[in-house]
Structure formats: structure tokens, C-alpha cells
Image (cartoon, grey):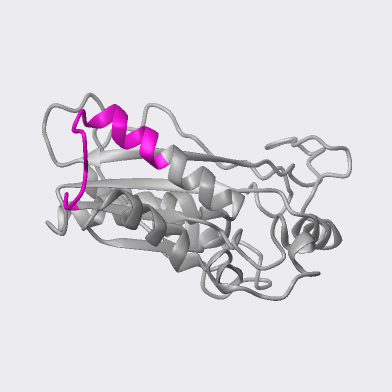
Amino acid sequence: MNPQMMAVLETTTLTLCAWSRRASLVNTPVGFFLGAGGSMSSEGVGAGASNSKAPSVYSGTSGALSVASGRVSFTLGLTGPCLTLDTACSSSLVAAHLAASAIKLAECPQAVATGVGMLTQVVSIAFSAAGMLSAFGRCHTFDRRGDGYCRGEGCGAFLLDSGVSAKVAVLGTAVQQDGPSASLTAPNGSSQRRLLETLRDCDATNRALEAHGTGTALGDP
């Protein structure tokens, strides 16, 4: 099994076990939304070892984005909406947005949003060549010394419920694309500003703001 899929299955199972004490979740209408950010590509972890062997049935499933989420719903017996999405570094947050939207649209009463990322050699080399990674190995966010960010890996998940007993509430979410910008990978400040303005509709008082903080002169503004 792809190690990232294993992390997704284990982390999501632990999240659901913390929410429900049922012996089985088979046929429960729980939705599952996974943000993978392209991390299931064929050059991922373990690809080098498998290249010397003839392809098998597992060669196709181990790198499929659809299988990354489908395996969870299949194994646990979940019948709610299920999908994997890749929106690069925003994949996990967009997965959370879709999970919240699915509940709001009554597509499912509960949904799990999971995000996974694992370091791979090819991606790290490509990002370094593009000047995205810090040559000093440290992220200086909102700092004139910022010369890039540092990659990390891991898997996280949380469950959203339509019930009213939750201690934390999602008041609103919004998603949009940069549109035209300086380059394919460059952010668009005006587009990001318009996105933040849409949050006014959710009547939320922003006492704190958490930023992604890439630590680059292009991304931080």
C-alpha cells in the first residue's frame, strides 16, 4: 500500500473512532474529503523500488488519487460523498471547505476532511530549482530575509458534524482561484483580497488571523 494511503486510512479511522463509539461504521452516510496536493504521483515514496518489477494490479491503485479516498470509504463502509482533490498547497483547506459545504447542502450529516503530504525527492528538487525553497533551511515569514519556505510532511484530519453540541463552529468558508497573475505558480494579491472580503457574509469577528506564511517576497504580500 502507498505509505500516504496508509497514513490517510489510519488517521481518518482514529478520527472517526474518537467521534463514534459504534462497533462498526458500515453504511453510515459520512462524507470523506481528502486533500492530497499531487502527493500520490507515480514518483512518490517507494516508486524507485517498484520500477525493477513488472507492473501488477497494485501498481495502478497505489498511485491513483481516487483510490486514496475510495479506500477509506470502502474499508470503513462509509456511504457519503467521497473524493480526493489536488489544489496544490491549499488542498487540505479546500477539502475542509467542500466537507462543510456538503453538510450545508444536506448531502451528508457528518464529513471528515483529511490532508496528507509526504516528502519526495523529485518534488523537492523541482521546487528548489524554481526558487521556492529556502537556501538557509528556515522560513522567515513577513521578513525581508525571506528567501523561500521549508517543506514538511504529515497527515491530519478532523470531523465536521451538523449537530449543535460542538464546541467549535465553522461560520463560513470561501474558495476561489487566482486567475491571471505574473506566472502559473505566482499568487494574485487582488484575487486573495476579494476572497477575504467574502468572509464578511459569515458575521465572524476576526480576533486572530492565521496566514500560510510562505516566507517569500512574492507570496507574503
Above-or-below relation of 102 to 113: below
- State the residue in front, 53 or 178: 53
Q: Which residues are magenta?
A: 12-29
**Residue 94 screen position, x and y as percent:** 41, 55
- State the residue in front, 220 or 14: 14
Q: Is residue 15 magenta?
A: yes
**Residue 27 screen position, x and y as percent:** 17, 53
Q: Is residue 92 left or right of residue 25?
A: right
Q: Residue at x 51, y 73 (%)?
A: 179
Q: Residue at x 66, y 52 (%)?
A: 219
Q: How many marks?
A: 0
Quadrant of the rendering where the N terminus is positioned: bottom right
Above-or-below relation of 204 to 86: above
Q: Residue at x 48, y 46 (%)?
A: 8
The image quadrant of residue 37 is: bottom right
Above-or-below relation of 127 to 64: above
Q: Is residue 157 magenta?
A: no
The image quadrant of residue 202 is: top left
- State the residue in front, 19 or 126: 19
**Residue 189 screen position, x and y as percent:** 56, 58
**Residue 102 screen position, x and y as percent:** 22, 57
| Residue 183 visible in the current orientation | yes
| Residue 197 visible in the current orientation | no
